[in-house]
Image (cartoon, coloured by chain):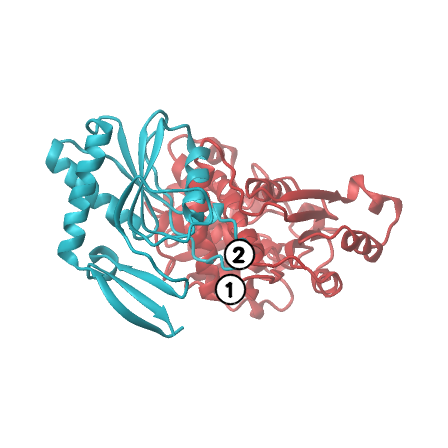
Chain colours: A cyan, B red
């Protein structure tokens, strides 16, 4: 599908600042990081989760574990546009009674997050699950909201948000694009 | 990529497709290590296991794979169904079609019957073994087991040893191993080779000691006594002497090499009691890994065939 870049929403410095601010917010709300674990949603949620965990380490001098979650098995659109290429899930720590910080790049309909919640709950019973997203673009179809938002960007349905991160794409930026 | 497809022979999958099944199997292995070993991915799909021939591990493996993907499963087995009352294959298939299923897993004693069945049913079919012909999911799980052990398949030297005449595992494995870049050597005496063994397209030896110190994988085939209506080999002692794996031969193998067998093992024939039970060579005998991997590989296959398929 041909897509047109309409506007740059965040550059590299913006992303660095936002992830620092979110690290502070997480520490403030949870009164430290003793009980925290991070789970990034494949793919771009994982580098973002790592960076927030790194920020927390430099603030609190304490390592916070980061896991990877692929939600393909839990999607509700089986038979439509499931990717055949599944990413790995790797949560090498016990989540029982933990405060999970779930991280994704863009919050849109909320269906990915619904799937992620189901996947996590199948693995154990955390104390809380809190959601971090870099961008909230609206258009929710489920009663789901984020606890920590990098930036709210109202969009129309024929636009989409393109997030690029250094680790997977070689650059840090967020742009609004349109399908035309 | 595999949506709605049949898997009847190992060669139905190209290199890229085999690669995808194996890569996704890693994700299913992770599911099998969880506390709750079940994901809702194929909820609402119904799979039939139709076994005209006895089987324990393949049938159970498919059953577990289906259930761990939350699909529903019905079992038809020859010994406990109308097949025993004299129903024809075609009538059984008619019955199955009326049940509105999504996929069939079929095992049958006659080589080549799968094409006939799949032409009639109009839903995807996986061959779980047809006579002496093919057993493609065994080839997939064996390839996965080798890949898990060595990381890469390219250039590995594999010897398949034993009853080539009656073994469907042999046929599927030779095809898939070669396709994935492994060097395949067949070790079998002439009376246990098919008439036209040039179709195998590999080197053929009759004595295991000619290759035992060179191979990365020693794959022992099961003597198919149930399919041998006459004796193909003079004596078990002689089989043992030229083709059996004992402690001495195991010691002659390369340091990082491994032993595989599709099971069930005829102890004392293909592999000696001593090797089967030895503790120090436990991580070189991959037979139980093959069984575990079987579930993950079959989950991967069912997922790829069914997950993108719209209900009719």
Q: Of marks 1 and 2, which one's residue comes earlier in the chain?
A: 1
Chain letter of the residue carrying label 2:
B
Q: Is residue A70 above or below residue A2?
A: above
Left or right of A47, for residue B53: right
Return the x and y of residue B228 as percentages of the image width and height.
Answer: 71, 51
Label 2 sits on residue: B304
Chain letter of the residue carrying label 1:
B
Using the rendered image of the protein, determine whether residue B209 is visible from the camera's viewpoint. no
Q: Is residue A159 above or below residue B295?
A: below
Return the x and y of residue B214 as percentages of the image width and height.
Answer: 37, 54
Left or right of B296, for residue A89: left
Using the rendered image of the protein, determine whether residue B233 is visible from the camera's viewpoint. yes
Return the x and y of residue B295 as percentages of the image width and height.
Answer: 53, 43
Residue sticking out furthest to the right: B86
Q: Which of B120 and A178 is in front in this view?
A: A178
Residue at x 52%, y 53% (from the top left corner): A77
Q: Nearer the viewer, residue B5 or A28?
A: A28
Label 1 sits on residue: B1
Q: In which quarter of the image is residue B125?
A: bottom right
Q: In which quarter of the image is residue A94?
A: top left
Dot 2 surroundings within 10 Å: few (below 14), some, or many (20 or more)? many
Name the element at disc 2. Answer: helix
For the residues bearing labels 1 and 2, Cβ distance under 8 angstroms: yes
Dot 1 surroundings within 10 Å: few (below 14), some, or many (20 or more)? few
Q: Is residue A93 above or below residue B72?
A: above
Name the element at disc 1. Answer: loop
């Amino acid at each position: 599908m041909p897509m047109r870049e309409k506007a740059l929403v965040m550059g590299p410095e913006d992303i660095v600042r936002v992830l620092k601010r979110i690290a502070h917010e997480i520490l403030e709300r949870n009164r430290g990081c003793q009980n925290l674990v991070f789970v990034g949603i494949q793919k771009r949620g994982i580098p973002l989760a790592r960076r927030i965990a790194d920020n927390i380490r430099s603030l609190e001098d304490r390592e916070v574990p980061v896991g990877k979650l692929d939600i393909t098995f839990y999607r509700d659109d089986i038979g439509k546009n499931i990717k055949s290429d599944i990413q790995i899930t790797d949560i090498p720590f016990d989540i029982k009674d933990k405060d999970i910080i779930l991280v994704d790049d863009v919050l849109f309909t909320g269906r990915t997050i619904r799937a992620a919640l189901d996947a996590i709950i199948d693995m154990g019973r955390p104390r809380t699950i809190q959601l971090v997203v870099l961008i909230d673009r609206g258009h929710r179809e489920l009663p789901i909201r984020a606890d920590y938002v990098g930036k709210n960007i109202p969009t129309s349905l024929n636009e989409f948000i393109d997030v690029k991160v250094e680790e997977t794409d070689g650059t840090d930026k967020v742009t609004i694009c349109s399908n035309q | 990529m595999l949506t709605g497809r049949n898997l009847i022979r190992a060669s139905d999958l190209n290199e890229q497709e085999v690669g995808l099944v194996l890569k996704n199997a890693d994700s299913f292995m992770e599911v099998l290590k969880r506390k709750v070993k079940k994901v809702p991915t194929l909820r609402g799909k119904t799979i039939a296991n139709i076994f005209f021939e006895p089987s324990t591990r393949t049938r159970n493996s498919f059953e577990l794979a289906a259930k761990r993907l939350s699909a529903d499963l019905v079992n038809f087995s020859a010994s406990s169904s109308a097949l025993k009352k004299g129903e024809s294959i075609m009538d059984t298939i008619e019955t199955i079609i009326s049940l509105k299923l999504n996929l069939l897993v079929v095992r049958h004693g006659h080589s080549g019957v799968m094409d006939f069945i799949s032409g009639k049913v109009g839903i995807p079919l996986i061959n779980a073994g047809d006579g002496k012909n093919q057993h493609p999911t065994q080839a997939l799980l064996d390839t996965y087991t080798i890949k898990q052990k060595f990381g890469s398949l390219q250039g590995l030297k594999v010897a398949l040893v034993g009853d080539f005449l009656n073994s469907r595992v042999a046929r599927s494995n030779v095809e898939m191993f070669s396709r994935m870049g492994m060097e395949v050597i067949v070790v079998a005496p002439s009376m246990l080779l098919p008439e036209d063994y040039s179709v195998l397209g590999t080197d053929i030896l009759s004595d295991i000691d000619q290759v035992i110190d060179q191979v990365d994988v020693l794959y022992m085939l099961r003597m198919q006594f149930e399919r041998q209506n006459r004796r193909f080999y003079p004596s078990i002692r002689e089989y043992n002497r030229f083709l059996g794996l004992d402690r001495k031969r195991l010691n002659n193998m390369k340091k990082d090499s491994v032993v595989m067998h599709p099971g069930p093992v005829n102890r004392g024939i293909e592999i000696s009691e001593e090797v089967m039970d030895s503790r120090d060579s436990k991580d070189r005998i991959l037979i139980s890994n093959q069984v575990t991997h079987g579930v993950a590989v079959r989950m991967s296959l069912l997922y790829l065939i069914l997950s993108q398929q719209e209900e009719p």
